[in-house]
Amino acid sequence: MKKIHKADTLNGPSPLAYVPLLLWTAFMVAILVYIVGASLSVPRDVFTGQVFKYSTGLHWENYVTAWTTQKLYVYFFNSLIYAVVACTGGLLISAPAAYVLSRCKFRGNHLIKRILILVMSIPSILIILPIYGILVKLDIRGRVALCLVYVCLRVPYTTVFLLNFFESISKTYEEAAAIDGCTDMQTFLKIALPMVRPAMTTITLFNFLSVLNEYFVALLLTASDGATSLGVGLTSVVSALMYTSNYPAIFAAVVIVVLPSILIYCLASRKIMYGGMGGGIKG
Amino acid sequence: MKKSKTFIACFIVPCLIVLAITYFYPVARTLCMSFFKTGSVTAPVSTWTFAGLANFKRIAASPDFRRGLWNMLRIWIFGGVFAIGFSLLFAVILSHKSIRGKHFFRAIIYLPNVISAVAIGNAWLYYVYNYDFGMLNGVLKVFGIEPLKWLGPDLKFGAMIAAAIFGVVGYYMMVFIGGVERIPEDVMEAATLDGANAWQKLTRITLPLLKGTTKTVFTFWTIVAMQFFVWSKVFSPIGTESSTIVPIGYMYEILFGSLQSPEIDIGTGAAVGVLVAAIIMVITSLINRLFKTDDLEL
């Protein structure tokens, strides 16, 4: 076993294997560096291709233009609210459901599991119009409407993700707790939930980023009021800035929008990368 | 472990209510709406008038919708070939035991999946493809080639697909890596002992054993491609353009945007949704037939 591993290491992958990886990485880094660089420049320097000269210094006011003047902060905090509420609400509904689905035998258990997996592949175009109708009819508007919808839309994936995790851990501790006289609720809160904490972190990070970056639902459900999300808001900020060809401020707006996601990703890239894999395949 | 019925009910009922309100009822209502002239989105069912296939006929006769379907088909095919090709290539390279910077490269390639597509789209639009100072024309200049109008009518569609593929490759790469890592160690060891070289191991073992994973990725891509919308919207922010219109964009425009007209109502929009969902179902079940995974499935 060890020998073969050693032989493999000696052979190594062909140096050619690094070429596509390095090209792809270089392209990505080039975009990021340029965007950040240009966001501190002035339109004239961007047009003449002298972005990194900064002949008139660093122009942080581009960020003020995007953040304050163009009201990006409104959209930013809206999306932050959606993401936090969707994560919390999703967990509150999904964690108990995942727990009983994995631990208790009752009629319809198997059917519910199958339905949860099935609804994950329902395209949102097939559900969004009636959801819009319900919201209008109940007069639920603005931020509350999007919060509710995002919570609901995160439930199937979150439940299935936690369900798989609950099924992979031993029931022994819970059984011991029950014998020692814990009520069902105590067993769930004090024994079962702490054991799935890593899975809850993963799915929360994943849900957070999904909602933060969501576009289609936000576009359809927020008609011109203060509830606009980050993605939809960025589109209007960019078109407004294009009137004056203020490219540096456009790039500043892009940096503001991607920064939270990149920061979270830097802290927990492994968790987030594998968090996305829980629904489609078992792995 | 026996749990009381009340306990089970309290834990599962909220989830069931969510499923009913967000999935069962809306799907049923959308299906019905597509066969009716409905008026506004809140109009009660009693005011609907049965329209048979009129909604479907109307969208089928619309040049914008047809163009959208044609674009969707091309996105599915071209995008699929490149997205699956690149993700498979990266997966094979990055699941090699002794590749350096394995985690770094995986994380970098996956990165676009965690960023707002609107933001990356604008980065492509205003930097990479820019005519005056963009990255691609800058590269062309180095080689002494005339700058190209990447966002002109001829190249825009390709430019849009390229940007979209760049965004999804990392996700499919991770799915493929999952597949490669499930291939049993001893199969590879046996092949190595029998003197198979790297290429033989790839084509005779890895790729055939990835059949099931390829099916998964292909299915995911089909669902994504048929619902293609964000990139189309970012690449034509003002209204519809025939080079970038897709069915969902068409639905958005007839209901909320520039293509609104008196005879088009929510029912027509629902018909677009039903049609797209039907196409997804047909294609994914075809994929299931084509990729019949037998004993090879891992």
Image (tube, rainbow, N blue to C red):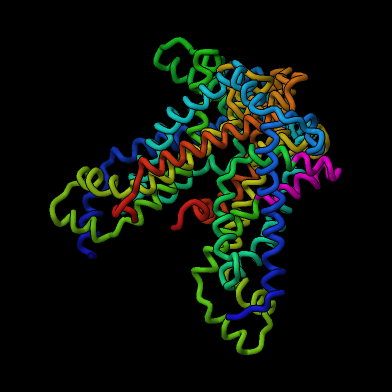
Quadrant of image for the N terminus of chain B: bottom right
Residue A148 magenta-drawn? Answer: yes
| A243 vs A58: above or below | above
Quadrant of image for the C terminus of chain B: bottom left
Left or right of B35: which side holds B134?
A: left
Residue A97 magenta-drawn? Answer: no
Name the one closer to the observer, A200 or B115. Answer: A200
Q: Position of residue B281 (x, y in %)?
A: 51, 39
**Residue visible at 16% across and 49% down?**
B196
Q: Position of residue B210 (x, y in %)?
A: 33, 48
Q: Residue furthest right?
A: A139
Q: Main secondary structure of the magenta part?
A: helix
Quarter assignment of residue A36: top right
Q: Is residue B74 visible?
A: yes
Q: Residue furthest left?
A: B194
Quarter assignment of residue B4: bottom right
Give the extent of the magenta segment: A132-153
**Residue visible at 59% across and 41% down?**
A123
**Residue visible at 53% across and 77% down?**
A171
**Residue visible at 31% across and 51% down?**
B294
Q: Position of residue A113 (x, y in %)?
A: 56, 60
Q: Residue furthest bottom?
A: A180
Q: Position of residue A232 (x, y in %)?
A: 71, 34
| B160 vs A121: above or below | above
Q: Is residue A41 visible?
A: no
Left or right of B36: which side holds A205?
A: left
Left or right of A94: which side holds B95?
A: left
| B109 vs B118: above or below | below
